[in-house]
Amino acid sequence: QSVLTQPPSASGTPGQRVTISCSGSSSNIGSNTVNWYQQLPGTAPKLLIYSNNQRPSGVPDRFSGSKSGTSASLAISGLQSEDEADYYCAAWDDSLKRVFGGGTKLTVL
Amino acid sequence: QVQLQQWGAGLLKPSETLSLTCAVYGGSFSGYYWSWIRQPPGKGLEWIGEINHSGSTNYNPSLKSRVTISVDTSKNQFSLNLSSVTAADTAVYYCASEYSSSSGLENWFDPWGQGTLVSVSS
């Protein structure tokens, strides 16, 4: 069981806006920043969002992140077929441990 | 542009020791933490532990008794040893670079190695 809680699945049609939630506690999301990773099938995870809402160079602005209290969200607007992947949230936990969510499988219908 | 390349044995028997190595190319080796993360088949990600260029380590408390992470600064490499493996340790193992801000409040993994599937079976 993962420390951070994500819905196991999400879906949308091309062009739609989809959000993925990530719920934690005061010892992780509540007191530290949140990162998001995208894992395309058969590949290593790739940094998608860091420090709650920052995009690395090369990540389209269709992807955005936010955080409020002990929860965070990833939003994908203008959904495209190539966005079909697993998405993981992550944060530092005050127990000096890095923790991840269980992952959300995004399906583009 | 930092790149990570990892290697190690892919098939182990129960009670053996898992050993993986990750080489860092194209960037500074000092000033970062270097982590190991694993992903059981069809499941989520689990952080194993990390090391910096000075050899300072942090481990996941759930694995700490079996994990050793070491560094070879002369080769820009770091390694993972996980002892007494069982079938529950079957996973894809990734190495990753961890950026940490000066405040220590912002940390993220980027980039990641290509992953190594390690299977434990008798």
Image (cartoon, coloured by chain):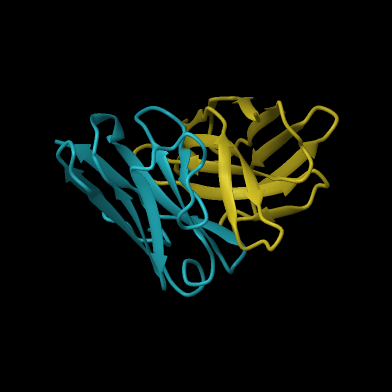
Chain colours: A cyan, B yellow
- Tell how many labels: 0
Return the residue nearer the eye: B55 or A83.
A83
Residue under the image location 41 percent in, 64 percent down? A67
Asked whether residue B86 appears in the rendered view, the answer is no
Q: Is residue A50 above or below residue B3?
A: below
Task: Tell me where residue B15 appears, x and y as whole percent.
Answer: 58, 39
Determine the residue located farthest toward the front in the rendered image.
A61
Residue under the image location 85 percent in, 30 percent down? B74
Classify residue A29 as left or right of residue A75.
Answer: right
Asked whether residue B117 appears in the rendered view, the answer is yes
Return the residue nearer the eye: A1 or A66.
A66
Classify residue A109 as left or right of residue A69.
Answer: left
Task: Tell me where residue A37 appears, x and y as whole percent.
Answer: 44, 44
Residue B78: quarter of image: top right
Residue under the image location 70 percent in, 29 percent down? B24
Return the residue nearer the eye: A36 or B21.
A36
Task: Tell me where residue B108 appears, x and y as whole percent.
Answer: 57, 49
Task: Tell me where residue A75 appears, x and y as whole percent.
Answer: 31, 51
